[in-house]
Image: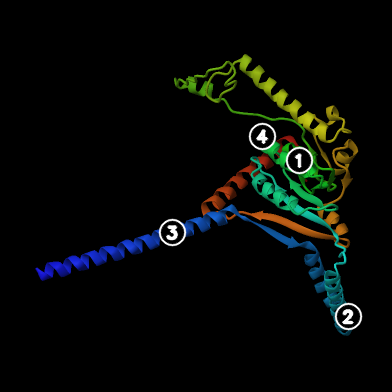
Amino acid sequence: MEFLYDFGLFLAQAVTLVAAVLILLAGAMALGQRQRSDLREGHIEIRNVNEKYQAVSDTIHAVVTDPAQHKQEQKDKKKSDKAEAKSKKKQAKTGDQIENKARLFVLQFDGDLQASATDNLREEISAVLSQAKEGDEILLNLESPGGLVHSYGLAASQLSRIKEAKVPLTVAVDKVAASGGYMMACVADTIVAAPFAVIGSIGVLAQLPNFHKLLKKNDIDFELYTAGEYKRTLTMFGENTENGREKFVEELEHTHDLFKQFVKGNRPALNIDAVATGEVWYGQKALDEGLVDAIQTSDGLIQARIKDWDVYEIRFVQRKNWQEKLGMAAEGAIERAALKLLQRANRPDHI
């Protein structure tokens, strides 16, 4: 009897211990999951471009300058920095206004077909606008061959937030801002482009294969049911009609008109009928057509501001698991291959 009592007490203690361990593990897993979720939400990274350029300049100067002269310059610089810090500290104590440089915030947008960088752009713009003051400006380095209408429409709307906040916006195009990419660029107060950057392609494209004849040849039926005359105009497997084709083209024309109106609204001096033909132009020709405002690279623009401005690169970083990274890499490779094939088939823009 005593044995059964001792065994029952031991069993109760064991169950209690196991339950306590399970509760602790569950709590730890929940905390870890929450922390991972927080990390997945991402964070803002800020890089001082002035310091980057100064570090490179100092490294080169140290190599090409006489060692004795460089040593003396280092001593003089330390004295100068110490005096400047002391002066600022004194100004802060006396309440005097410390003169600050204007700031240039540099953002980056690498566009794919879905404009998937829009989520990061949204966070970056929100962060900058929360700190921007009078005299500050934003520079967006933009690269995109275009993509889905609604995706790039949202990306352009994010840039419109900058204009609504009355912060000057410059878009720099070093390689390409075509179609949806130009839809974004035209929102800017100023557009600069490298001499051989591809600009324009103000048009709308849609294409799809049709396997109806193949299915019919193999006695395979395809049935599609819709409610609404134009719920589906063209299909990949059904027999397309002339009425459906006409409606599809009508929808494309309507989208094109919206695109033209958007560009014209942001660049009223542009002869929209002359440039909204779906054609693309290289930098200088794009300048002649009024699609851009100056020929300059993003690096040249930043370098021109470094001396008198504080320049900061702003980047929203989102942590991704390996599956997402692998999927993005595969998707990017497919898109690049498709773009190259399209360019070689339709454009004389490879050398």
- Mark 2 and mark 3 lie on one chain; the one further toward the N terminus is 3
Mark 4 vs mark 3, CA separation in Å? 39 Å
Instruction: Please tell me the numbered disc located at residue 119.
Output: none
Reading the image, the residue beneath label 4 is 150
Secondary structure under tag 2 reads helix
Reading the image, the residue beneath label 2 is 76
Secondary structure under tag 1 reads helix
Q: x%, y% of residue 346?
A: 73, 35
- The amino acid type, in three-letter code, at marker 4 is His
Mark 3 vs mark 1, CA separation in Å? 42 Å
Residue 222 lies, with reference to residue 25, above or below; the image says above
Q: Are marks 2 and 3 in contact (CB under 8 Å)?
A: no
Secondary structure under tag 4 reads helix
- The amino acid type, in three-letter code, at marker 3 is Met
Reading the image, the residue beneath label 3 is 29
Residue 241 lies, with reference to residue 104, above or below; the image says above
Mark 2 vs mark 1, CA separation in Å? 47 Å
- The amino acid type, in three-letter code, at marker 1 is Ser
Reading the image, the residue beneath label 1 is 160
Front of the two marks 4 and 3: 3
- Mark 2 and mark 1 lie on one chain; the one further toward the N terminus is 2
- The amino acid type, in three-letter code, at marker 2 is Asp
Residue 319 lies, with reference to residue 117, above or below; the image says below
Badge 3, how many Cα within 10 Å: few under 14, some, many 20+? Answer: few
Q: Residue at x 57, y 25 (%)?
A: 210
Q: x%, y% of residue 318?
A: 61, 54
Q: Residue at x 57, y 21 (%)?
A: 232
Of all residues shown, which one is farthest toward the front?
94
